[in-house]
């Protein structure tokens, strides 16, 4: 039991009584409903010291449940020949342009087709063990639907050097994003704390306390369709989960296509000009510029790539 973690729930509230157990547990923890269902089936959910085996058990006011989380079994990712858009490569680091839709490293539901699978095939044995079995070579990540520049370490020295720079936020990372509306002021700094949303634990949010400091410098570069959509640049001074998406939403200007944090304005849903923008299938976010100190040669490395075709197409449709 020493390798296992436990979750003790708070008592079931009166308004939560008679809910399906799997649904209630997923609503009060950070576990997905499918994960909860699996834990119930395996006998890892307890009430009064006895395992609960029925997912559809109805909750009752005041009940407290204990969930035991068994240690994860890490599967070794397999090499897959997947094309990579490599911007720069030497014996120590690799800089690439990650396409939207590619997951960075294997996780539940995504064991194949990830960037790690592609890197293992491209770099062969050199990545073995660098940064961990599941995330070899990975020192930072981009969301699945975010495109753009990433740097990967190819050996221990590079991994340690890059990780140290990420820890003190000395790398420069800038993003281009398409957001709804015109920002006022047109440039500025957003600085607050980002943590788990108290309303939805599966989302991040600006919080009063308990989060981590997050700082984003933004600048509006252009506007389209009479100010309905803007192109902005965001430079990160910290690297929090979903930082740009959360900060822009907090300003009232969510990203196009961001189904988690944003909402398409009603007028955009009924405008032929804004149709392509309203139907954009991912969050319109692209890591376009990066600079860092080479972890071995100590030279300053700078990279910049243009907008991807899908974001450029939206801009063209609005001009």
Image (cartoon, rainbow, N blue to C red):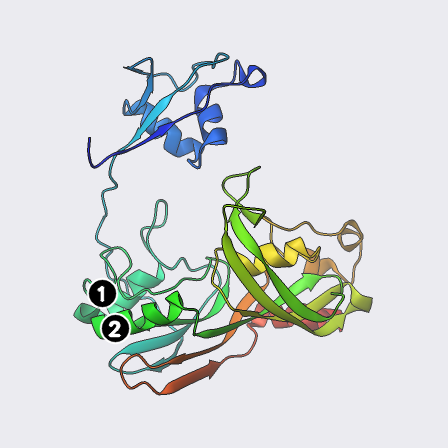
Please state the horizontal and vertical placement of residue 69, each as a whole percent of the image: 30, 33
Q: Nearer the viewer, residue 271 or 39?
A: 39
Q: Which numbered dot is residue 130?
A: 1
Q: Is residue 281 visible?
A: no
Dot 1 alpha-carbon crowd within 10 angstroms: few under 14, some 14 to 19, many 20 or more: many
- Left or right of 318? Residue 10 is left
Q: Earlier in the sequence, mark 1 or mark 2?
A: 1
Dot 2 alpha-carbon crowd within 10 angstroms: few under 14, some 14 to 19, many 20 or more: many
- The image quadrant that residue 51 belongs to is top left
Q: Residue at x 21, y 70 (%)?
A: 156
Q: Is residue 53 above or below residue 29?
A: above
- The image quadrant that residue 118 belongs to is bottom left
- The image quadrant that residue 89 belongs to is bottom left
Please state the horizontal and vertical placement of residue 243, each as a whole percent of the image: 54, 58
- Left or right of 154? Residue 60 is right
Q: Nearer the viewer, residue 2 or 271?
A: 2
Q: Is residue 247 above or below residue 49?
A: below
- Give the distance between the C-alpha atoms of the residues marked 1 and 2, in whole angstroms: 7 Å
Q: Which numbered dot is residue 154?
A: 2
Q: Are marks 1 and 2 in contact (CB under 8 Å)?
A: yes
- Which type of secondary structure does the marked residue at label 1 adopt? loop
- Left or right of 229? Residue 70 is left
Q: Is residue 197 visible?
A: yes
Please state the horizontal and vertical placement of residue 84, each as a whole percent of the image: 37, 72
Q: Residue at x 48, y 30 (%)?
A: 28
């Amino acid at each position: 039991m020493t390798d296992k973690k436990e979750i003790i729930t708070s008592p079931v509230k009166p308004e939560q009584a008679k809910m399906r157990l799997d649904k209630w547990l997923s609503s009060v923890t950070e576990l997905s409903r499918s994960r909860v269902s699996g834990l119930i089936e395996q006998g890892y959910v307890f009430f009064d010291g006895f395992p609960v085996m029925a997912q559809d058990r109805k909750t009752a006011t005041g009940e407290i449940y204990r969930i035991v989380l068994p240690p994860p079994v890490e599967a070794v990712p397999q090499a897959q020949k997947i094309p990579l858009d490599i911007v720069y490569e030497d014996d120590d680091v690799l800089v690439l342009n990650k396409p939207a839709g590619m997951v960075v490293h294997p996780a539940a539901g995504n064991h194949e087709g990830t960037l790690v699978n592609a890197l293992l095939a491209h770099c062969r044995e050199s990545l073995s063990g660098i940064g961990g079995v599941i995330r070899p070579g990975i020192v930072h990540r981009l969301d699945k639907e975010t495109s753009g520049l990433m740097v990967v370490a190819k050996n221990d020295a590079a991994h340690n050097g890059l990780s140290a720079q990420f820890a003190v936020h000395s790398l420069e990372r800038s993003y281009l994003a398409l957001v709804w509306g015109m920002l006022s002021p047109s440039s500025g700094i957003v600085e607050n704390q980002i943590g788990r949303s108290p309303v939805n634990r599966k989302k991040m949010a600006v919080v009063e306390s308990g989060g981590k400091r997050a700082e984003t410098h933004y600048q509006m570069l252009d506007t389209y369709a009479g100010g309905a959509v803007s192109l902005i640049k965001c430079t990160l001074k910290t690297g929090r989960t979903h930082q740009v998406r959360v900060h822009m939403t907090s300003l009232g200007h969510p990203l196009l296509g961001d189904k988690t944090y944003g909402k398409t304005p009603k007028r955009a849903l009924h405008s032929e000009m804004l149709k392509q923008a309203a139907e954009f299938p991912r969050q319109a976010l692209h890591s376009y510029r990066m600079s860092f100190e080479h972890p071995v040669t100590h030279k300053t490395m700078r990279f910049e790539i243009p907008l991807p075709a899908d974001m450029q197409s939206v801009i063209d449709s609005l001009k």
